[in-house]
Image (cartoon, helix red, strand yellow):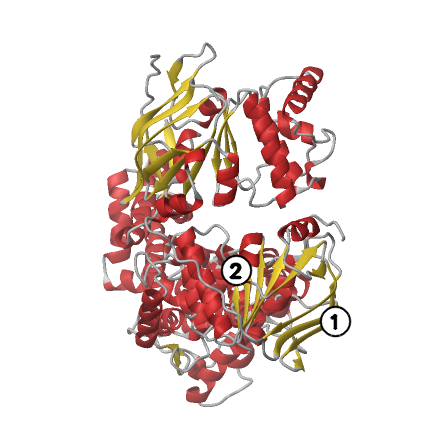
Amino acid sequence: MIRIENRNSSSRLFKFSIPIISAVVSLILAAIPLAFAGANIGEAYFVMIKGVFGSVFAVSEMLTRATPLIFTGLAAAVAFRARLWNIGAEGQLYLGAMAAVAIGTGVLDINGFFLLPIIITFGCLMGALGMVVPMALKTRFGADEVVTTLLLNFIILIFLQMMLEGPLKDPMGLGWPQSAPILDQGMLPTLLTRMRVHSGLIIGLVLAIILQIFINRSIWGFKLRAVGENIFAARHAGIGVNKSLLGVAICSGALAGLAGVSEVIGLKGYLTADLSPGFGYTGIVVAMLAGLSPIGVIAAALFIASVFVGADSMSRAMGVSSYLADLVVAMSLICVLIGGFVSNYKLTFTKQKKVTTK
Amino acid sequence: MSAQKVLSLRSLSKKFGSVVANDDVSLDLYVGEILSLLGENGAGKTTLMNMLFGHYLPDNGEILITNKSNQMEQLRLGQPQAAISAGIGMVHQHFTLAENLTVFENITIGVGSLWALKTDKKKAQKKIADIIERSGLVVALSEPVGRLSVGERQRVEILKALYRDARVLVLDEPTAVLTPKEADVLFDNVKAMTDDGLSVIFISHKLREVLEFSDRIVVLRHGQKVGEMLTKDADEQSIAKMMVGESTLISKRVNIQVGNPLLSLEKVSMKGSSRRNRLVDISLKVHEHEILGIAGVSGNGQSTLAELISGLQKPDQGEVVLGTSTVKKLNPKVIVKAGIGRIPEDRHKDGIVGNMTVAENIILESLSEKNIQKFGFLNRGSINSIAEELCSSYDVRGPGIHAHARLLSGGNIQKMILARVFSRNPKIILANQPTRGLDMGAASEVERRLLEARKNGSGILLISEDLDEILRLSDRVLVIHSGVLTEIENMDREQIGLMMAGESL
């Protein structure tokens, strides 16, 4: 017979190892669909690893892919720590991206030293705005933010298409629904010559460290954690719950907006409606894999980016579908959720005792 | 009571990690007997009963129970279903009833097979009527449980157990939610049932009840059985000593002249949808050097009153006055700033953040203070030394100040909350059910602290269901019933008991 018992305490090591084990297990489980696709499994894994770590260029591609995931992962992690379920990072990302092209394509033709901070700030503001609206609906009407943020994604995406066909459309773009290019001085510098990896990565890493410190060490972070862990006790203790949540919402939205800014002014240089292949949603997985720790987000984003980049090169070399990457990412999330359950409860197997009559 | 055993627990042991919850506990229960199981919180009473009922699997030991043909038989351990079919019934402190179903449905639910197409309602009704007649547990079967009083709900719980042919009934602190009068009725009913052959294990903190009501007493301490005696040979002093290991000091209350008013409610009303959250035209004043006791059966507006004074709710009408000035904007922050210490009723919900550390929980209300924060950052060093100091002076025992607060036991959680409240030297203290669920040692510590604060000039509003506690501590007593407060002229136990039940005098 199997029984579920509460684990009284779970060790630090145990908590630490769950995401790692989950990541490995999800990769191993990927062998099953690979086998169904008829690929040589050993070769497939080899190609995958080579595709990520085989050369400086491969690593740089992986880092390029990880950059937006760090931002959206942080956006989700900060919000989820306060039990504010921001599912709208995808939409906020596009708000940030729109802000970047609205400012960076020629409206302000000034020195990059001034232009870059203005673009970034404006992008953050727009992203934050995209989270403030659901927050206001939540505090005013009690509307569930899961629903409002999720639905806002679609509204924003349609708004984006409208803007790309209208005011933001590149007059020189031969009719394609895309924005004009960002001015040269409005672009973030790349980190390596002839590689795509850009300084958005540095911004992301620094922000993760700052957030780690703020969440654990600051009064702001203390309130955020208290609100997230027990909103009733926090309110009872005189912590301004709505104010704290608003702060978290702004922070989360701004981070998601920054993901969009960084993609536009670091990588693409212009905006199209397919800027993000779901970075906002993948950020949720990143945050969960990271155990909602900002530093952990870095590691989780690197892992997920590796899976995507590796699966891409595997699909090119072996002819299997690159959807495999989505499968691995999804499985890793499921493994982490199961791991979280295992860390809080334990299963004990007991033998049935024979009934004896005396 | 006969000499025939119905149940026998033999050398039961249970460990949780490194904590020994039960160590080699054996006890026998005889047919028609009321056995009191006494012990402080954490003494292992609940664990023992949970093993009996199959919720926990003992590490060691066995349980024997008589079968239908009166032979002792081993009970399959760790299976509630086996315990129920062997005739063990349990009435938990927190009821397990479905409020939207009728009494009849609640009693019969889960007895028949899930796949049975129809149940024999007539037969069931007859069986219940029969049980009601023999036990005197009268309830209207067609009434939805949601409309019943607490006492009636408890009767439904007992009926539920009896309907499943319970021969052993475990009552876990059954009087905690009852008025004195309701409790007397319960005792009469239980007596009638034991005359009929039922055996009862009765868990309680209230020594007076145990002495009046039971035949035999078993005392647990630190998971071990430390005493067993016939009730007629026991007295309050000796049992208390056995429970805590040494005799507890009962704090002496000295008379002090009261000072200026600190907190007043003036004609405060809350509309509320039921008697639970309604307040009707309430006025009260708490003075310096005064403990104002509010007696009442829980669910008569106490929680709403406490939420109002905690700043969690705003009155629909009337005013809250602190000192001489009316509070315009009532919220918890204002209340914390004004120096009102609050010991919340539900400490797990409102009192602590379980997944934050003990140190963080201690400073939860002091975030804006200079020694806690430096430029918006937590001053870890100073916080840790404050927490260490408070934990030792308030005797908070547990895995240390960096452990999560949820790992502390109930009594230690309360001590941690006391440390938070009293370390801020509050002028006004709202103590809502401050000793509920605490063992005698922890409870007398709470009472000592409250009396000490009173001596030092604080005004205390004490809300409690424990009438003995109210009478022991209070300078004045108000009784609350259905949201109406009534002042008591002379502190007469009988009279207060009647008023708690809603009888106007």
Which residue is rendered at x = 34% and y = 71% of the image? A209
Q: Residues within 10 Å of mark 1 (few under 14, many from 20)?
A: some
For marks 2 and 1, the one nearer the N-term is: 1
In the picture, measured across the screen, residue B268 lies left or right of residue B463, that is right
Give the chain letter at badge 2: B
- Residue B318 tag number: 1
User: What is the three-letter code of the residue carrying label 1?
Assistant: Gly
Q: Return the x and y of residue A259 as percentages of the image width and height.
A: 45, 68
- Is the residue A187 above or below the residue B17 in the image? below
Q: Nearer the viewer, residue B211 or B32?
A: B211
Helix, strand or loop under label 1:
strand
Mark 2 or 1: in front is 1
What residue is pinned by disc 2? B350
Mark 2 and mark 1, same subunit?
Answer: yes
- Is the residue B145 above or below the residue B412 in the image? above
Q: Return the x and y of residue B320 as percentages of the image width and height.
A: 67, 73
Q: Residues within 10 Å of mark 2 (few under 14, many from 20)?
A: some
Quarter occupied by residue B328: bottom right
Asked whether the viewer can see residue B53, the reply is yes
> The N terminus of chain A appears in which quarter of the rendering?
top left
Which residue is rendered at x = 54% and y = 63% of the image? B431
Helix, strand or loop under label 2:
helix
Q: Return the x and y of residue A352 as percentages of the image width and height.
A: 34, 22
> The C terminus of chain A appears in which quarter of the rendering?
top left
